[in-house]
Image (tube, grey):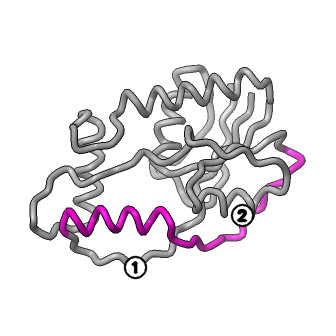
Amino acid sequence: MKLGLVRHFKVITNEKPFLSSKEFTQAMANYDVAKVRANGLKINAADWEICYCSTLPRAITTAETIYNKEIIKTELLVEVPISPFTNWNIKLPLSLWHIGARIAWYKSHKSQLENIHQTKHRINEFYKLIKNFGYENILIVSHGYFLRMFYEEMKKKGFTGEVDLNIQNGRLYLIED
């Protein structure tokens, strides 16, 4: 099986550099509906039998821009959600909110809507889905952190390929089993 992994195009956003927990929650909601900037990625649709994509607008727009055949949208591919790791009423750098939320997710902290075990379960459910359909060449359009976790889980199943530690927007990565 050959999988093509694509992180959605870069999101157009103008969030403030320092945010309160409430502002961070709003920033994440804004990010989920923000427009994206295409980067000219070209996908040869003949190389792929099917495309699966997250149900979030940034992934759908990317998939529809790069692939002109059947696209199946699934909640299984949405980004790992993040929430403020605390309700402190102080402003912290946006990057600190992200790092803190990812640590909280990894530690299965109650502040997060999904924990690491739930994310891995979702990944494995998606893998079962694509394996059962029998496609050999599958394009997947999703999100940076989710794709990083997906790649790590696929390596455990024998997939090989090179994926950047920080998965780039609008770039095709190939992995195969």
Looking at the rendering, the stretch of residues picked out in magenta corresponds to 20-47
Front position among marks 2 and 1? 1
First in residue order: circle 2 vs circle 1: 1
Q: Residue 127 sits in which quadrant? A: top right
Q: Residue 63 sits in which quadrant? A: bottom right
Residue 41, labelled with which disc?
Answer: 2
Q: Is residue 137 above or below residue 88?
A: above
Which residue appears at 24% of the width and 58% of the height?
97
Determine the CA span between mark 2 and mark 1.
24 Å
| Residues at circles 2 and 1 in contact by the CB criterion of under 8 Å | no
Instruction: Give the side of residue 121 with respect to residue 157, left or right.
Output: left
In front here: 83 or 137?
83
Instruction: Give the side of residue 163 with respect to residue 83, left or right.
Output: right
In front here: 75 or 173?
75
Q: Position of residue 40 (x, y in %)?
A: 72, 70
Mark 2 neighbour density, 10 Å: few (under 14) some (14–19) many (20 or more): some
Query: Quadrant location of the C terminus?
Result: top right
Q: Position of residue 145 (x, y in %)?
A: 45, 47
Magenta stretch: includes residue 30: yes
Query: Quadrant location of the N terminus?
Result: top right
Residue at the farthest left position: 89
Determine whether the residue tagged by mark 1 lies in a helix, strand or loop.
loop
> Residue beneath label 1, please?
14
Magenta stretch: includes residue 54: no
Instruction: Give the side of residue 6 with respect to residue 150, left or right.
Output: right
Q: Position of residue 94 (x, y in %)?
A: 27, 66
Q: Amino acid at mark 2?
A: Leu
